[in-house]
Image (tube, grey):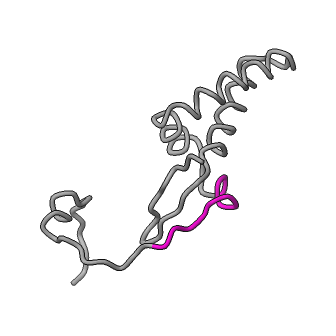
Amino acid sequence: MKYLVVILGNRRFKIPAHIIADSRANYYAEVDSKGDKKLYDASYQTEYQHGMSSDCELFAWAHNNMNWSDVENDAIEIPIENKEVDLELAWIEADMDVIDMED
């Protein structure tokens, strides 16, 4: 089974890819079919398969068009192991921000 893995704060979750592909396919099938059931079904199948076969499409759709509430019920938490971290490597790969803050 294919999943999108996301880290939220200090928690990690896997989201079944079919949830995201379904959301994407429903949207495009609605737009493409303009209410025609036969066109909807054909468009849905095409878009669903495209979403499932493209990691980039899954990531982009989830990031730009979905909220946590859309996937929360299907999200599966993945425990994060407490292991030694190479801080030199982590520093190079870290997300960084500059902020103003009271000491």
- Please tell me whether residue 4 is drawn above or below residue 24 in the rendered image: below
User: Residue 84: horizontal and vertical position, in percent?
Assistant: 25, 77
31 or 75, nearer to the observer? 75
Q: For this view, does 92 lie left or right of residue 95? A: left
Q: For this view, does 70 lie left or right of residue 92? A: right
Quadrant assignment for the C terminus: bottom left
Q: How many marks?
A: 0
Q: Is residue 76 magenta?
A: yes
User: Residue 13: horizontal and vertical position, in percent?
Assistant: 53, 62
Q: Is residue 78 magenta?
A: yes
- Please tell me whether residue 98 is drawn above or below residue 22 in the rendered image: below
* Residue 85 location, quadrant: bottom left
The residue that appears at 68% across and 31% down in the rendered structure is 25
Q: Residue furthest front?
A: 1
The residue that appears at 15% across and 58% down in the rendered structure is 92
- Please tell me whether residue 102 is drawn above or below residue 68 in the rendered image: below
* Residue 30 location, quadrant: top right
The residue that appears at 45% across and 35% down in the rendered structure is 56
Q: Residue furthest left?
A: 88
Q: Which residues are magenta?
A: 69-79
The residue that appears at 87% across and 20% down in the rendered structure is 37
- Please tell me whether residue 94 is drawn above or below residue 85 in the rendered image: above
Q: Residue furthest bottom?
A: 103
